[in-house]
Image: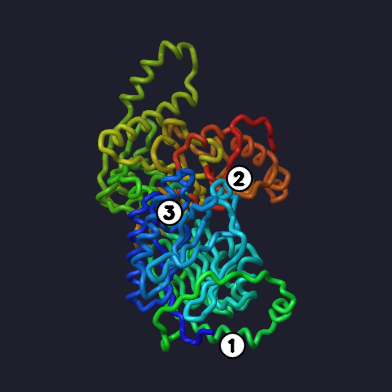
Amino acid sequence: MGNGLLKVALAQIDTTVGDLAGNAQKVREGIARAREEGAQLVVFPELSLTGYPPEDLLLKTHFLDSAEAALHELAAEVEGIVALVGYPERSDDVYNAAAVLADGHVAAVYRKVYLPNYSVFDEQRYFQSGDEGALIELNGVPIGLTICEDIWEPGPPLTDEALTGARVIVNLSASPYHAGKGLEREAMLVQRARDSNVAVLFCNLVGGQDELVFDGHSVAIDVDGEILARAPQFEEAMTVCTLDPGAIFARRLQDARHRPAVRRGSGRPVATLARLSVPAVESGEVGGSAAPVLGSDEELYRALELGVRDYVQKNGFEHVVVALSGGIDSALVALVAVDALGAERVTFVSMPSPYSSEGTRADARAIAENLGAQFLELGIEDAMQGFDNLLAPAFNGAEPDITEENLQARIRGNIVMALSNKFGWLVLTTGNKSEMSVGYATLYGDMAGGFAVLKDVFKGDVYRLVAWRNEREGRELIPRSVSERPPSAELRYEQRDQDSLPPYDVLDPILEAYVEQDLDAEEIVRQGFSREDVGRVIRLVDLAEYKRRQAPPGVRVSTKAFGRDRRLPITNRFRDG
């Protein structure tokens, strides 16, 4: 058994789905840097060669063949270090696999055992599952291999690998973010290390992919559950950590919990796929650097920022446009857009109507000035009059109602889409999750655009994030009046959101219970909400399903977002409440 130190690099990279050449280059550069850092083993995320999730690209045989070819090109360059790279293996079926690259070739392949098929995952659509865990030996140190869900599931394959003798468990992961996920995941990994008397090396993907955001937060954890190293959240990083496999073995001798299990053969013995050697590390300090964990507000803000940046850049947009109303939602989108892309890549457009207050108009101008981005003011009164004239014969004798209000939103939607068409700008929409939940949004109006930044952010969180961003800046980037003004769509005189909705401090918890926790009306009422409010909110949510199905994609930051997570039929007569 090896007695030297084990120096490992966790390479959390930001991949782009389908960009095999670009992803391979990131892996190539990561291997070179890890070797320069003196690492013996470098770990990359799950499916790092293809990006995650590749979805129906995995049904294309030429895509799988191209990924395989890229993998072997990489392998031919690997010398003096071992690299673990995620890729889709095409064999008798397709497997979510980890390739062990060493000595100029693919030395071994491990196949993911547990394929998640819940929440945003549908891996059983694409992959066959592997049969069992597996080890490699590196300078005599037994190392267990796992991929993402394999370590979330208590028991095998991790326990089989540990009982077979693994001192270190490596996990290649593409674990998507939701608020608080990083610390939840870290606590789980600590438990796995303690339970099985192993060190855990977890390398997670970072970056935005359509609606998903991956937070990085890769960690190295010792046999006692202590964090040896932690990569930063929401940014690419290489984190180098040194382990002492001899100390792990000694710790096992002191803790005899697993000896009876080994004697009984409780775990299935797993194969050692490869025995590899690299230059030894005889001395050095155990551990590595540990980046701090972000506070809840900064974490959520950084997730939105990364989601916007990657969606814009990976889809080839140079510039974005935001309808800036002077309200709190568009203010937060403005902040995120400028922080993600830079003020020079953002244009704000204010589109006042006769119902727009001077306060909101002034605030829109102030926000644009504070953020240093281009500002356009395009009044819509003439366009409103034009539509009134056009529709007058058809509407003859009908009283004005929500139709005229929605026309204003649709005029604005036309304007931002015209700017998008003319200049190639991506439209960032500004509606939040509270509004989307209850249908307080206009199809082809304020819902018109390419990416919905706040699609998964409740109204209360919008206020909190704006306050946090102002505090971080040390000045009011967003004027206080924006937060203090009662929320209003300003589509008629003296309109207030609370004229047609419960107050947001009532609405948001009911929505969280119904949408994210799937509680029924009676369960929500028992939490202390009025039966009238609960029934009304549930009816609004159910009736708005057709709108949400037509909404643009947006950043997922909760445990259940509209889109990939929550899938309900539009044609549906079941009513709860």
**Which SS class for mark 1?**
helix
Which residue is located at x 52 percent, y 37 percent? 548
Q: For the residues labelled 3 and 1, say whether their Cβ atoms are less than 8 Å apart.
A: no
Q: Quadrant of residue 184?
A: bottom right
Residue 241, quarter of picture: bottom left
- Name the mark on residue 515: 2
Q: Which residue is mark 1?
A: 250
Q: Are marks 2 and 3 in contact (CB under 8 Å)?
A: no
Query: What residue is drawn where x is 34% and y is 33%?
Result: 417
Q: Quadrant location of the C terminus?
A: top right
Q: Is residue 361 visible?
A: yes
Q: Residues within 10 Å of mark 1 (few under 14, many from 20)?
A: few
Q: Which residue is mark 3?
A: 51
Which residue type does callout 3 highlight?
A: Gly
Name the spot of residue 137 as percent of width and height, x first: 51, 76
Q: Nearer the viewer, mark 2 or mark 3?
A: 3
Residue 525 or residue 146, whichever sits in front: 146
Q: Between disc 3 and disc 1, whose residue precedes?
A: 3
User: Dot 2, how many residues are within 10 Å of its Cα: few (below 14), some (14-19), or many (20+)?
Assistant: some
Residue drawn at point x = 33 percent, y = 70 percent: 32
**Residue drawn 33% across the image and 55% down it:** 22
- Disc 2 secondary structure class: helix
Disc 3: CA contacts within 10 A as few (<14), some (14-19) or many (>=20): many
Amino acid identity at mark 2: Val
